[in-house]
Image (tube, rainbow, N blue to C red):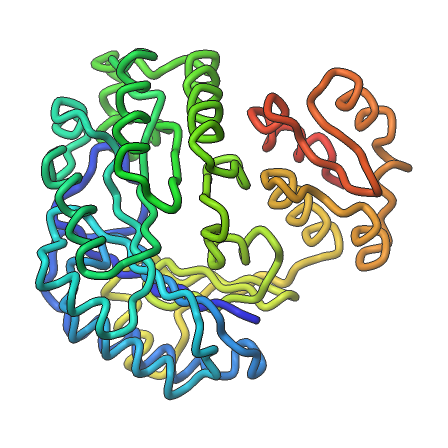
Amino acid sequence: MAGIYIHIPFCRQACHYCDFHFSTNTHGQASLIGNIEAELRMQKGYMGGEKVNTIYFGGGTPSMISNAEVNGILETIFKNFDVEPSSEITLEANPDDLSPGKLSELAKIGINRLSIGIQSFDDAVLKFLNRAHDSGSAVSSFEEARKAGFENISIDLMYALPGQDMNDWKKNIDLALRLAPNHISAYSLTIEERTVFGKWAATKKIKPHDDDGAALELLMLVDELEMGGFEHYEVSNFAMPGYISKHNSSYWKGVRYLGVGPSAHSYDGMSRQYNVSNNHLYVKAIESGQIPATFEALTREDKINDYLLTTLRTSWGSDLEKLSKEHQYDLLKFHGDYVHRLVAEGYAALTNETLRLTKSGRLLADKIASDLFT
């Protein structure tokens, strides 16, 4: 099985924390959508005819484009790829875009999973983040999505926000649980240099959360959501039984995927490619019959390190037997002392040739993975 990711690079306004590729200028939107469809046709052989079982509209803000444009992209995918009838088809959306009419039409054209970017239920925090919605529209958009028939809804939350304390965070978690989504993705605020927050941090206008404070907020989230019936299946992701994100899980499981649109990434098992992060250059290349991508062939070491980095973030962990069979790499031979120290200190468990990080270990997942790199 394989996945397709579509990057829609438009936003109504720039969130102060965002470092993804996007544009608030929608001039040329129709042309860009047309070229995304053209790239899908050009890339129809990328995954070697493998069946597609997940489609994901990300961004940017995919809910900004019209339902007709979403439908046109889906029709192009179904005409050019072998898509499973029961595929998970996700669309990222902002609350302010989700009118009852739009939601009803999205359901009719085949979107069966929504990922709503709520971020916070606190109006002051939303204004600080420069989000376009308020807490009222966050709640109402979720409720309207349920009324429109969406049975699989994920929401995004942010923690480690300047000025937010543990009580504030607990209130956000309680409100999220009250809505009863099927899935929650929660991300620690990262201050990126090229963002508004990056500039504010450089001039001491804001003071970022310290790592210990962020860790305490994540541990609170884990405890509260697990008591609420959620599985913490990846460092930033929680799901009710049966609602793990199939698309995102494919990234962590090494499944092939095709990414189309400006800045989209693709992976075919042997290499990665990265589309140019510029709308004009992207359109110009596609119109001339070129895929505007940088190509990277993966070495054996790249594959080993990628496997460790992605799987150690998950509840299923790293299969050491698979590492040995597929990549001829004996992790315990090279890092046995370190692994056993992790186990002794309560950061990991090693059972049946599978290395899994504990609740405290996942707080250090990226550091532990890098320590195990070949």
Q: In which quarter of the image is residue 67?
A: bottom left
Tell me where residue 369 appears, x and y as whole percent: 66, 35
Q: Which residue is drawn at 12% across and 28% down?
A: 127
Tell me where residue 334 appears, x and y as whole percent: 87, 35
Tell me where residue 157 appears, x and y as whole percent: 31, 34
Give the camera-side residue of 275 and 150. 150
Q: Which residue is drawn at 21% across and 33% down?
A: 16
Above or below: residue 270 compared with residue 9: below
Give the camera-side residue of 102 and 70. 102
Quarter of the rendering occupied by the N terminus = bottom right
Quarter of the rendering occupied by the C terminus = top right
Above or below: residue 279 compared with residue 78: above
Q: Residue at x 20, y 54 (%)?
A: 145
Tell me where residue 143 appears, x and y as whole percent: 18, 47
Query: In the rendered view, does 165 fall on the left or right side of 222?
Result: left
Q: Quadrant of residue 328?
A: bottom right
Q: In which quarter of the image is residue 345?
A: top right
**Disc count in the image?**
0
The residue at the far bottom in this view is 79
Query: In the rendered view, does 299 fall on the left or right side of 49?
Result: right
Give the camera-side residue of 209 and 220. 220
